[in-house]
Image: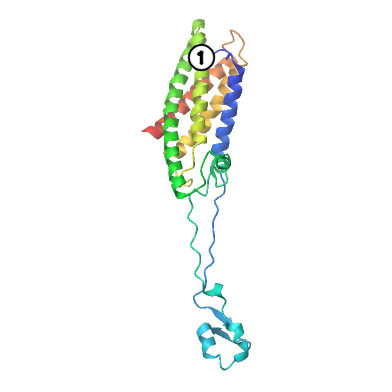
Amino acid sequence: MTRISSFSAVVFSILIAAIILLHHTTAIAQSVTVHDLIPQNFVAQGSLGQSMTLQDADTNRNLFPNTHSSLKSSPSDSAAPAPPKHRLQPANMSFMEHYLWDEDGLFRKWGWAAPLTPDERKAELDVRRTMLTAHQIGGFVTEAAMIGAVYFGQRTIDGDRSANQWHQPLVAATIGAYSITGLLAILSPPPYIRRDNETSTTTIHKLLAWVHFTGMFVTPLLAQFIHRNDYNGIARFHQWSGYITLAALTASLIVVTF
C-alpha cells in the first residue's frame, strides 16, 4: 500500500479516533440519592432523662408541665418524606453524553436541545434511535470502502502499480465514512438506561471499536513513512494493520446485526 496523498486526512482520522477513545473509556460516576427516613416511633427525651414516645409525652403532660415545650414536635418531624426525583437520564453517562446532553449540557446552552422534560426526553430517544440506525448503515458503507481499499492496496503490493489510483480514493472514502459514522454514535443522546455491568453484543461491539479505531489511527500513519518501491519494510506493517482493522470492523458489524 502506498503513501496517502493528503496528510490532512490522516490528522482528521487521528482526531476522530481520539474522540471515540474518550467516548468509550470515560464515564461519569453513578450518583446515588439518599433519602432520610423518618422513624415511626419518635423518641423524646424528658428533663428527667426518661425516654418517652409521643404517646408517653401526652400521658405525662400534667406530671411534667415544665417539659411540655421540649416534647412538642416540629412540623418537619411529622412531614412525609419527599418522593425521590425520577431520573430522565442514566446516572453513568459517558463524558461526551454528560458534556453535551446533561441538564446544563452544551446542546441545551446553545439552544440546540430543549430543556430536559419527560416529553423532551422521549423525543431525544427517538433522535437517538434514528442516529444509531444511520450509524449502523454508515458502518456498512465504511466496510465496503475499506474492503476496496484493502483489495487495491494488496494489488499494489503485488506489483500492479495502476491499482494505486483506486487505492488512494478508497482510503479517503474510508476515512470520511468512518469519521461520520463514529460521530453519529458519539453525538447521539444518551439511552434511558445503561447497564454497563452486563455483557452484551453492545459491549463486544465497543470492545472491538478499540481495535478498529486504533487501526484507523495506525494504518494511514504508517503509510506516510513508506518509501517508493519499499514493499518489504513499513509497507508490510501497513498491510497487516489494514487487514486487522478490516477484521475488527467486520466483527463489530456482525455482533450487532445478527
Q: Which of the 4 quarters of the picture holds residue 18?
A: top right
Other-residue count near label 1 (Cα within 10 Å), few / some / many at <14 / 14–19 / ≥20? some
Residue 59 spot, x, y in % from top left: 51, 90
Above or below — where is 80 with respect to 166? below
Residue 115 spot, x, y in % from top left: 52, 46
* Coloration of the structure image: rainbow
Residue 177 spot, x, y in % from top left: 49, 24
Q: Secondary structure at mark 1?
A: helix
Asked if residue 221 shows in the view, the reply is no
Residue at x 46% of width, y 45% of height: 120
Q: Which residue is mark 1?
A: 169
Asked if residue 76 shows in the view, the reply is yes
Above or below — where is 80 with respect to 172? below
Q: Residue furthest bottom?
A: 63
- The answer to which of 135 and 166 lies nearer the viewer is 135
Above or below — where is 27 with respect to 18? below
Residue at x 46% of width, y 39% of height: 203
Q: Is residue 180 left or right of residue 234?
A: left
Location of the N terminus by quadrant is top right
Q: Which of the 4 quarters of the picture holds residue 236?
A: top right
* Amino acid type, residue under disc 1 in the picture: Pro
Above or below — where is 67 with respect to 180? below
Q: Is residue 115 left or right of residue 256?
A: right
